[in-house]
Image (spheres, grey):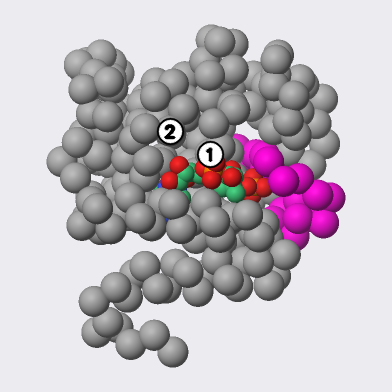
């Protein structure tokens, strides 16, 4: 057991969740390496949400509320670290979750789908009938009723091959990535440089605050946000 008084409790808990994710077959073994990279950046940030990240979270909430077809893309790390928050965000936005894996196997897709169903979510991405142009990895095949037709896609903890292709298709992307220098961070419409375990609860709170606000005000929030400035 990890004592709550440990100064790095949150970080150790995340390692534990990922370890369980790997044991259950939800998270890829490479996901542990990806987490290690993120954890190093988080250490440098003081394991706190910066004021720049807070602004990015507010702008993301506004962008998601303005979207006609927002889609939340889930991978093995997100499914292990923040499945409940992801499901909650999907419900309050009425936005589908699509399983989109880099190290895709049928077994992992089914396990992630099963765990989301327990949270009341029927995910997309099991059947894929749309090809993202120029994206040769498994991430390139998506659902036409999900990422295929989305105008805004939330892409947490992503390897660098997809954000640019999505943007080329005219979609807006919101990245959650602790590495501000990653390709995904640089290409995305909005980049939240924060740990997913802190960013998602804050994003949910912002969506709740802004969901009854008129669209003109939401547009102002999005338009006044300058992504490059915060990287
Ligand atoms: O489940 P799959 O098969 O789709 O694979 C998922 C991973 C994450 C393994 C895959 O997409 C991958 O290899 O990603 P990368 O290239 O390692 O990129 C992951 C990014 O997420 C890196 O820039 C990390 O800094 C960042 N990251 C890691 N953990 C966190 C994080 N960002 C926010 N919160 C974290 N907890």
Question: Badge 1 local density, few (<14 within 10 Å), some, or many (20+)?
Answer: many
Q: Is 124 left or right of 165, judged from the image as shown?
A: right
Q: Is 175 left or right of 201, judged from the image as shown?
A: right
The answer to which quarter of the image holds residue 146 is top right
- Label 2 CB, ligand 1: below 8 Å? yes
Q: Is residue 82 in view from this perspective?
A: no
Q: Is residue 150 in view from this perspective?
A: yes
Residue identified by numbered label 2:
182
The residue depicted at 70 percent of the width and 70 percent of the height is: 24
Q: Nearer the viewer, residue 188 or 60?
A: 188
Measuring from the top left, give residue 42's x and y in whole percent. 31, 54
Measuring from the top left, give residue 207's x and y in whole percent. 33, 39
Q: Nearer the viewer, residue 83 or 133?
A: 133
- The quadrant in which the C terminus is found is top left
- Relative to 106, does residue 24 appear above or below in the rendering? below
Q: Marks 2 and 1: in contact by CB < 8 Å?
A: yes
The answer to which quarter of the image holds residue 114 is bottom right
Distance, label 1 to label 2, CA atoms, is 9 Å
Confirm whether the magenta stretch covers residue 29.
Answer: no
SS for dot 1: loop
The answer to which quarter of the image holds residue 28 is bottom right
- Relative to 6, does residue 202 appear above or below in the rendering? above
- Relative to 162, does residue 176 appear above or below in the rendering? below
The residue depicted at 32 percent of the width and 46 percent of the height is: 194
Q: Which numbered disc flags the more N-terminal residue, 1 or 2?
A: 1
Residue identified by numbered label 1:
158
The residue depicted at 29 percent of the width and 37 percent of the height is: 57
- Relative to 11, does residue 178 appear above or below in the rendering? above
Instruction: Identify the magenta region.
Output: 95-115
Q: For the residues carrying marks 1 and 2, which lies nearer the camera in this image?
A: 2
- Label 1 CB, ligand 1: below 8 Å? yes
């Amino acid at each position: 057991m990890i004592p709550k008084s440990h100064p790095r409790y949150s970080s150790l808990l995340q390692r534990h969740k990922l370890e369980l994710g790997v044991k259950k077959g939800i998270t890829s073994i490479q996901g542990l390496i990806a987490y290690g990279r993120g954890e190093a950046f988080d250490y440098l940030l003081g394991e706190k949400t910066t004021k720049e990240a807070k602004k990015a979270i507010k702008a993301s909430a506004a962008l998601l509320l303005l979207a006609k077809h927002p889609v939340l893309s889930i991978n093995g790390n997100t499914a292990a670290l923040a499945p409940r928050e992801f499901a909650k965000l999907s419900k309050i936005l009425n936005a589908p979750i699509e399983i989109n894996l880099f190290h895709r196997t049928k077994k992992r897709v089914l396990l992630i789908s099963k765990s989301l169903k327990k949270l009341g979510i029927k995910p997309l991405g099991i059947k894929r009938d749309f090809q993202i142009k120029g994206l040769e990895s498994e991430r390139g095949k998506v659902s036409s009723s999900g990422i295929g037709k989305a105008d805004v896609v939330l892409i947490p903890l992503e390897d660098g091959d997809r954000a640019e292709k999505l943007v080329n298709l005219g979609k807006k992307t919101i990245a959650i990535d602790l590495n501000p220098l990653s390709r995904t961070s640089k290409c995305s419409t909005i980049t939240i440089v924060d740990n997913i375990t802190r960013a998602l609860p804050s994003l949910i709170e912002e969506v709740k605050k802004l969901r009854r606000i008129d669209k003109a005000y939401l547009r102002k929030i999005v338009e006044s946000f300058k992504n490059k400035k915060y990287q």
